């Protein structure tokens, strides 16, 4: 419980005495590039192949002649929008972004760079962490929308190239019984996940003590705790919003 209380106190520190808005804007743009743009490649690879595998495995299990083959595309679409794109993408980002944030802040802490900022009268938590949190909350939904498109496109490529579904049936399937609210739900999840991943990873890195070994432990703990929080939040959001 003491760790949870320390975490919420840390969140309060983010909104304490801050710097000029222009300083935060520059830091925010830097973090958007570091967190969002640098993650596009891994998100594209993972999402495309997850969509392809989902299509092939769904077609493999859909053996009833009563069910139209276009249902394969419908299942791929709904799986991608509701779960695969937001949750799997954010778990991947928790490994990449979370470990990077924790190791960066942990290294700054043990090399006394954080202490130097405090000596200069700068709120180190706000200056170092707040731009990362805002950048994650801004770029994660964009990456998830991109991932959702590639999931469906990957399923289309795998299905049509292997012959398990025709192009016409796939397009009919992804248009069938579409619920626009699902897109809203897909965009809410990464917004929450981005906040959790960025703050938990920053918390683990910011309070690192010791040396290089402790930085590695902080990075590992950041990824583990971020993944658990994403899964718990995923269930809670599904319960509340669906």
Image: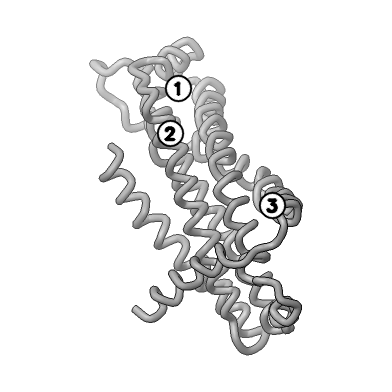
Helix or strand or loop: what does disc 2 sit on? helix
Residue at image position (31%, 27%) is 62
User: Which marked residue is nearer to the observer: mark 2 or mark 1?
Assistant: 2
The label number, if any, that marks residue 81 in the structure image: 2
User: Which marked residue is nearer to the observer: mark 3 or mark 2?
Assistant: 3
Quadrant for the C terminus in the image: top left
Q: Which of marks 2 and 1 is nearer the N terminus?
A: 2
C-alpha separation, residue under disc 3 versus residue under disc 1: 45 Å
Residue at image position (27%, 18%) is 67
Answer few, some or many: residues within 10 Å of disc 3's Cα (few below 14, many 20 plus, some between 14 and 19).
many
Tell me whether circle 3 and circle 1 mark residues in contact (CB < 8 Å): no
Residue 71 seen from this side: yes
Helix or strand or loop: what does disc 1 sit on? loop
Answer few, some or many: residues within 10 Å of disc 1's Cα (few below 14, many 20 plus, some between 14 and 19).
some
Q: Which of marks 3 and 1 is nearer the N terminus?
A: 3
Residue 100 seen from this side: no
> Which residue corresponds to mark 1?
164
Residue 240: % across, % down = 27, 44
> Which residue corresponds to mark 3?
28
Q: In the picture provided, is 186 more to the left or to the right than 89?
A: left
Residue 186 drawn above or below residue 222: above
């Amino acid at each position: 419980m003491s760790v949870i209380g320390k975490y919420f106190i840390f969140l309060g520190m983010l909104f304490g005495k801050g710097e000029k808005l222009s300083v935060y804007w520059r830091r925010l743009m830097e973090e958007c590039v570091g967190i969002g743009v640098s993650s596009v490649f891994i998100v594209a690879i993972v999402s495309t192949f997850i969509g392809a595998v989902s299509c092939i495995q769904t077609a493999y299990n859909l053996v009833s002649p009563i069910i139209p083959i276009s249902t394969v595309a419908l299942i791929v679409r709904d799986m991608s929008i509701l779960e695969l794109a937001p949750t799997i993408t954010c778990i991947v980002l928790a490994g990449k972004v979370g470990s990077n944030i924790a190791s960066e802040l942990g290294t700054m802490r043990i090399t006394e760079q954080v202490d130097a900022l405090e000596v200069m009268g700068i709120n180190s938590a706000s200056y170092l962490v707040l731009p990362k949190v805002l950048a994650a909350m801004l770029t994660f939904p964009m990456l998830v929308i991109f991932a959702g498109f590639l999931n469906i496109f990957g399923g289309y490529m795998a299905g049509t190239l292997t012959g398990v579904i025709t192009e016409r049936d796939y397009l009919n399937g992804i248009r069938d019984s579409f619920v626009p609210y699902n897109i809203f739900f897909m965009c809410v999840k990464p917004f929450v996940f981005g906040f959790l991943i960025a703050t938990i990873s920053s918390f683990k890195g910011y309070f690192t003590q010791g040396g290089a070994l402790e930085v590695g432990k902080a990075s590992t703990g950041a990824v583990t705790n971020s993944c658990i929080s994403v899964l718990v939040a995923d269930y809670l959001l599904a319960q509340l919003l669906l």
